[in-house]
Amino acid sequence: MPDNSTPTSSWRKEIDSSQTGNHFSRFSSFASGSSNFSAATTVVDDGVGDSKGPLGLNLLFSPSEPLIDIIFVHGLGGGSRKTWSKTTSVTHFWPQEWLPKDPAFKTVRIHSFGYASDWIKGKDSCLNIHHFGKALLGEMSTSPYLGEAETPIVLIGHSMGGLVIKKAYMLARQDAACESLAKRIHTIYFVATPHRGSASAKLLSNVLQAAYSSRAYVTDLKRSSGAVQAINDEFRNYSADIDLWSFYETQKLKIGVFSTLVVDPDSATLGYREEKQTPMNADHRTILLKSKEKLWRSQVKDLEKYLGVSEKLEDDLATAEDARLPGTCEWLSRKDTYLRWKDFAPDSPSVLWITGKPAAGKSVLAGYAIDHLRRTNVDHSYFFFKYGDKSKSRLSACLRSMAFQMACTNSQIRDTLLEMQKDDVTFDKDNERTIWRKLFLSGILQTEFSRHYWVIDALDECVNPSSLFDMTLAKIDRSTPLRILITSRETSELEKSFMTLGKDRFQSERISIADTLPDIRLLVEAKSKSLVVKDDIDRAALVEKILAKSRGSFLWTVLVLNELSNSFVEEETNQVLEDVPRGMELLYQRTLELMAQATRGKKVTKSILTWATCAARPLATDELDGALKLEVKGILSKSEEAIVALCGQLVTVDKFGKVQMVHETAREFLLNEALESELAINKTDAHTQIARTCLTYLTGEEMNPPRSGRLASALSGARKRAAFSLYACETFSFHLSKADPLPNDLFLLVNQFLESNVLSWIEVIAQSQNLIPLIRTAKNIRIYLNARTAERSPLGKQIQNIRGWTTDLIRIVAKFGDALIISPTAIYSLVLPFCPTESTAYNIAKSGRRLSVAGLSNTQWDDRLACINFPHGQTSAVCHGDEFFAVGLTTGTVALYHATSFQEYKVINHGEAVKFLHFKSKSDLLASCGVKLINIWDIRSGQIIHCFKAPQRSIYLAFEKNLLIVASERNYLASWDLDNDGAQLPDRPWNDSAEHLNTPLRRPPRAISFSAGHKILAVAYSGQPVTLWDLEADMYYGTCGKKLLNGETTTYIVSALVFKPNINCNLLAVSYLDGELVLLDPLADQELESLHANCHTLAASPDGRLLAGGAGFGTIQIYEFDTLRLLYRVKSSNFYIKHIAFSRDNLHFADIRGSQCNIWEPAVLLRDLVGDDSSEVTSTSVVEATAQEAKVKISAMILHPTEEVAFCGKKDGSVSVYDLKTGSQLQTLYHHKSLVHILKWWPNSDLIMSIDASNGILTWKLNKTQQDGWVAEKVQFQSRLDCGRSIIQVLLNETVGKFILTTRESDHLWSIDGNQQDIRTCPKAPGIRKWIQHPQSPLHMICIDGSAARIYTWSDWSEIAYLPLSIDTKGLQLRTVTLFTSRHKQRILLELSELDGSAHTRALHLLDATSFSLAHPSTREDVTPASNTKKEAGKAPIENESPDPVITSPLLISLTSCVAQVIGFRETGKLIFLDTHSWVCSFDLEDPGTGSVSYVRHFFVPYDWLSGTWDVICAILKRNVLFARNDDVVIVKGGLEHVEMVEEICVKMETGETKCPSGSLS
């Protein structure tokens, strides 16, 4: 049985899609048990006579339309049922009982096969594996279910069952009558199958012989027996056409006093190349049961991390269950409202609201409801809101927890969420609206699941309960099989919210005194036995007194019983009962007065109450100890006892060691502003004190950064911090935002923290792999700072420092987030040097840095992350997908880029000018539309899956589930069903009125938008309001638009319109040609907001939060969609903005204008992403930005041999010289008329050669003078290569005074005076060839074309040698060829990239340069010609017997998938490269390794330096690395000195899969 989903992936790909469709997803869901949180139950034998199961082929499950057949075959001593069951109970026979219930297997027909393999029973048997295989084949051939079907067959064999399957399959292949059946066998799973026999079989055979009995099939199983050897050898001849999976045991099976591997790994695997092998952490018996559990645990662990479910879910439930006495709360299960709710009664609403007074036992009742659902074995999820725990007080936490629990009990939901994780679907874990939309609306509620129950306790303790109603409860479809039970106090706010749902959507049940009094009686009677009273009569009287005063309050009763338990004489007991007041508030008042009478410890008491009432979450006792140590300079001995002793009955320490209020009513009592007591808690003062304590810790020694950036990694990893550390790091800004802004000491602590220890704090946050707290902290500090500057002068160095960090924290997340996730210690020395020079972050602790950056001209943060230029065409379309974004050009080219790094992924060609692009969500499909054609692409393979004829004048393109929808200017929708092989559906016309539905509409629309959630089409025509068309009913709906003063709808021309992409909102934004931007409720035809904006194009963010508009003169404006509040405005070039598209994560957006695509990430998008922790008034300020204009970019660079200067060619045709100490431009030397893309230096002659885009060649003599520096003295020659193809390489040889110019189709030999001497063309095989100087001879050169290397002479360009290269270049082209020396060995590195595609490195090959030696050549006549020039006779080719120059290196092959671009080599011979995470790294190619790749990371290169391509202009300068960024030469000084080792990451797997680094550092 497989322990992961890989086998199924193989099935899905290889079983014909027409047979399977999407009908099953994972072979993993075999033993899908109930929830991990279900109570354990004991199942006894069900009384079946033969628990082994029947013989022959047995049908276990048959769907109405089976698409696949699975047959289970047991092993030695097993049975058709026994082998596949954990116990003898039929309920544990998982292929029959559990597998059919898994939605992934609803179309799979399931069988089991039994045969007589019980060696304990019976007499001698001559039956062997051949007979069993023949029996299996016979049963399959004659089965009424299998005989006439055409379904693929999957066989699963355990132990000897695998051999039986192999034999049956071979017999089928050898029998013509079974040919069709054999072809249907698609996959075989071998589970602990002894392909080469088992040593245990010999022992068993000897035992049987001693008992005067024998079994032929046992003899067959002996190690290396003739039978198993013959089966294994013969099976190889038939196995090529089927998938083979082998799972083997790794734990010994205990048999009596012995332990052994029944089938060792060598025997359990076939050893075939196409076989997939998987070890299992199980013995021979449990191997069938362990895989499901292993996979389940692995998936749950992944989901815990993805959903951010960190707290143990059972803790709150355990607390509620511990508080409940046996026999209590059972009245609920007898309530008709509860029973009808639980039974999904048709007339029963899906929501049950149970209300009660404070402390009436609602949480305990919720615990009972959960236990009752669990005992009835139904799927359920639960959440306990806790106002005093920030992590449990927000709706977002509840939704994430519910999603996690539903995934734990339902494999289809689990698969859906895991797929989201795989697709990098991100969301702010504190934004409930995003969570609901992404996890539920787009995920969970789209899957099929059986009846499920939610139990939500204490909704009144949720800080934002209103969102549950308008976003969730009101929008859940009535057909959704989900029932929700909610408990809370009966507040007027909640009652209003429930009433908005409508009485048909919920029912309520109020907890009455009559309901709880019997339960309280049970409690009092149980506790009264330990009270001091005279006799049973007095005890009964005491019980009645307590019940009479309890008024149905469990908490009051518990607190009174606790106080009574401290009385030791009867009079004292009676006195307490007389003194104790009725009602919780009076009881709390009495408790507080007793605490105030204490003579010592009041300061500690007040601190404990402060933390218990106002902490963001309950602190553990050791965390509270740390806080009190800082706050009152004291340490509690025996913390738990001290807390209870000091704080009476207001604070408790629960069973998990968490300090919290005894009840929410106690917190409310202490925070009541009318409370007059020295122990009363003022909320603002409390937050101020907590913020002060947290900042005291954060500015203390424990948080000091390491002294040396070089030692940061080691020291940070080894440093042990106090238990209070995590709380201080995570929540200090939350308390700061709620603190009194006036105290100077608090202000100074904030400034001190940001000046001293902020970097170590960032490291701690980054170690959590979640950087959202950095953004939230920036927002909270801004709230604090705004409050302070309202009362104090905003001037001063400290204010500016703090304000600077509120910007820099957000920018650091945006620009360096990936680097910090991979390496949190990078913050110390690898991030700050790359920040703008005038930023606060850049100027912190500059003196101690070992790495510095020179030459950067940026002084301020730039909102533009990347500017991608397309020199050969105009941009015409842009769209974002889950992993990529695409840009379409008027030339027909579509360029695909990674959505996070903005680096080029692939280039495809639509074939005509691209009008529209659209990605299909959660798939690899992209639609491109032109005037004539619509293509559907698989972006992974770059292949066209469907090609459709485009409707006349297409104006809109979108996917709706599995339909492609295209709107035509002729007023109809064309659509294609991608689930039905792209079949075109009937066109659907629309009209602009209800009167002329049968008359085709002739006028063309000006703008159109489609609301997928409401199935509404909005169409704008000239001279009339916006038309609405109901696509679901296929009818005219009405009109809407901006309202005039007289109340009529305007007929102004519409320039753009867009629906808010949120199923819960009916909003439409419309931009008019007169400049008005209007927000409408289209279905109600109401104008909600309007303003003057001048937007000619509109785009909405996927979450519906933001609206972007392109205004005139290159201005982009970002609005809050719901209010049209302007948040951000940026102006760049004056080009007309054609289109805007948001990324799927809503964090950045792209625009296209002219021949550019710009990627923007304004800080406001990140800042507004996080959920609010405060009641901050929404700011009305607008962030105004002016993008730094793109300067003339450097397009080529070469270093002077002295490494003092670099010569750079630019896109405007200029050639300039730069100082390599400062990175500053010294002067411009000369100009071409077009872009310079190649520079070469002649060191002996001081000549510089430059080649431009039009093949213009200039060679200048340069001179360096003391006064003028570098100057261009005279032109050595000026020429042009007219061949119709661009020059792609130049090879110089100053010794012979010649050079070679290379294009894709020809090579040209020139002399240094500018005359062409020879030309060779390659018309039959044009491509990338690379020329290098021969490493041993200055008179020879080598040409490498991937498949071969040829040696030529410089004198007459004659070919003298030819070496074939054993390199697979299919689909690839040479990118670079580099000659280097490593450990005194000469090597040549070949770097290959995708053929005519992305520059990303796809292969690396290492050649031994000594193989090109000319020392002892031998003659050979069959030399393959390199061109159309006739080969000269008498040359001395390297003989055919010469060793292959390609050095085979598995580690280099593994490293390749981690390399994005080769930069070069250090003087030590180490390879320097840019990895796929944008880190500059190094690797020793001569290191033999130990089976895994270890390479060194040096520093991170910001993505915006790469400008959309893995073709960065860079060079190595000793220990420095140079980069050309725009018109800057940036020098990363000391960059190669910083070392972080990446270990055992890129390991080549047996399956051929290579896994790359995700951040593991030594």
Image (cartoon, rainbow, N blue to C red):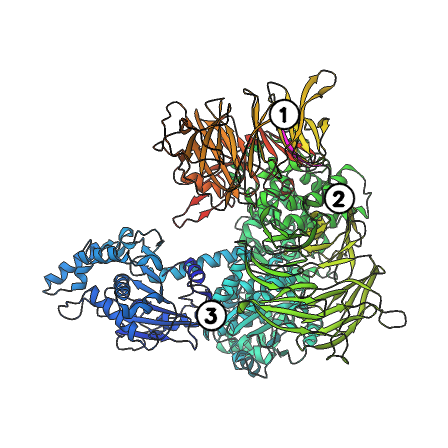
**Identity, as a three-letter code, of the amino acid under mark 1:** Gly
The residue closer to the viewer here, 535 or 94, is: 94
Between disc 2 and disc 3, the foreground one is 2
Q: CA distance from mark 2 to mark 3?
A: 52 Å
Judged from this view, the residue extending furthest toward the top is 1266
Q: CA distance from mark 3 to mark 1?
A: 74 Å
Between disc 1 and disc 2, the foreground one is 1
The residue closer to the viewer here, 337 or 122, is: 122
State which quarter of the image contains the N terminus.
bottom left
Residue 1351 percent across, percent down from the top left: 46, 29
Tell me, for residue 1350, which label it has, or none: none
Q: Which residue is mark 1?
A: 1314
Q: Which residue is mark 3?
A: 103
Asked whether residue 644 appears in the rendered view, the answer is no
Q: Counting residues from the N terminus, which is met first, the one under dot 2 or under dot 3?
A: 3
- Tell me the magenta residue range: 1190-1198
**Identity, as a three-letter code, of the amino acid under mark 2:** Ala
- Give SS at disc 3: helix
Q: Counting residues from the N terminus, which is met first, the one under dot 1 or under dot 2?
A: 2
Q: Which residue is mark 2?
A: 1187
* Count of all numbered marks drawn on residues in the image: 3
Residue 1438 percent across, percent down from the top left: 39, 29
The quadrant holding residue 1424 is top left
Relative side of 745 to 370, left or right: right
Instruction: Give the residue displayed 30% in from the left and 57% down from the top.
Output: 283
Judged from this view, the residue extending furthest toward the right is 1046
